[in-house]
Amino acid sequence: MTEKISLLEAFKQTDLRLGGHGPRDLHMLKKAVMNLDDHIESDMYGKGDVIEKFEEKMARYLGKESAVFFPSGTMAQQIALRIWCDRKGIKKVAYHPLSHLEIHEEDGLKELHSIEPILLADKDRIIQLEDVVELKEDIACLLLELPQREIGGQLPEYQTLEAISAYCRKKGIKLHLDGARLFEILPYYQKSASEISALFDSVYVSVYKGLGGIAGAILAGDRDFTEKSKVWKRRHGGDLISLYPYILSADYYFEQRVGKMEKYYKEAQELAIFFNQCQSVSTLPKEPVSNMFHVHIGVPKETLEPILIKITQEKGIGFTSYLKELNTGVSYFELGIGDMYEQIPKDKLQAAFTLLNEELLRL
């Protein structure tokens, strides 16, 4: 009798996967450093060529005066909001109800900085200009997440961003960009990173999400802002003696992948069509606006998981390593397209979706 395995175990056993860049293993670090000079000196407590050159490179790319490398985006963003609150003398900021700061950081902003978050808009939609205009509270800073991950990576129209930016500047409200996936939205907006960043006073980007580095983040803005962020970075314990494995991998995968975002975006659109043609399946958004989207399937988790395991084992393609329940009878998972998708032969991909549809029609 064959032993049952979990969805995660089945996913790990296949080399063909819909999303991501591949396993996060030692190979990704080896690949990043294999052709580098063995005598490159590490950074030391935030100083040295290896970190300063990368920070300068990212500042240029984002069109900002200065940039600082942080070990995590959580640290970088809390510090950004703290700086703006101190400058304004108001301990309140506004952001979406499903912001990372609100649902994934154990109230760090409140507990570490005594900053009160004001939640804008309904949780199922993105922030619009009228939400900001109708805000009754005085705030130091507004944070916008582009794309809004927890609702499938949705984006506002670019004109809306421009209008919000202009309104905030008129009212003296600092505008911060949670751009963890900023690189991934450039193809949709048909704008450069610096054009989008120009609408914001400070910008955070991840170096591991779409790029596939090991870990880390960049926080960019004017020099006074970034110099203050370095002080807070030290206070948070973010000045490790050296961060060069993170920085070298970030630099390598930035060069390898930032130019592929248009390709990933088009592949996400193609893949969403496959999903939307299946029984009881829909994507959010229906047509992706970046390389990431959510897949909603109107089947309970305990019913859907064996179907996905079967597809993985019989067709050799991993759809996802996990399932979450949106509500009773609906399961979902997130997909972010990277280097793995292009490795799947189209006939195999079609066969996997044919099997998915057949299994769902039987229910």
Image: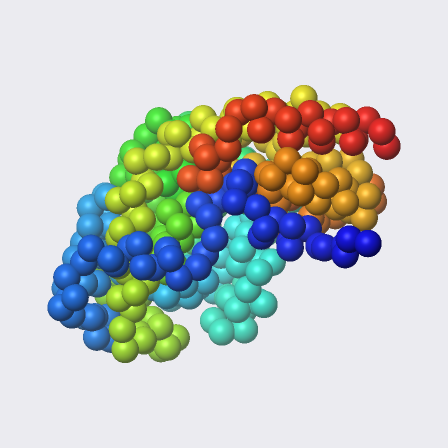
Say which of 254 and 95 sits in front. 254
| Residue 219 locus on image (x, y percent) | 32, 56
Quarter where residue 191 is shown: top left
Q: Residue furthest front?
A: 1
125 displayed left or right of 60: right
Say which of 353 and 280 sits in front. 353
In the rendered image of this protein, does residue 133 appear above or below residue 188?
below
Q: Residue at horizontal 29%, vertical 55%?
A: 32
From this viewpoint, is residue 255 visible?
yes
Q: Residue at horizontal 78%, vertical 35%?
A: 298
From this viewpoint, is residue 121 visible?
no
| Residue 133 locus on image (x, y percent) | 51, 39
| Residue 143 locus on image (x, y percent) | 46, 50
36 displayed left or right of 234: left
Say which of 177 and 172 sits in front. 177
Q: Residue furthest right?
A: 363
In the rendered image of this protein, does residue 109 appear above or below residue 325?
below
| Quarter of the image that includes the N terminus | bottom right
Quarter where residue 294 is shown: top right
| Residue 255 locus on image (x, y percent) | 26, 44
Q: Residue at horizontal 54%, vertical 41%?
A: 17
Say which of 223 and 261 sits in front. 261
Q: Residue at horizontal 20%, vertical 70%?
A: 42
In the rendered image of this protein, does residue 310 appear above or below residue 245?
above
230 displayed left or right of 353: left
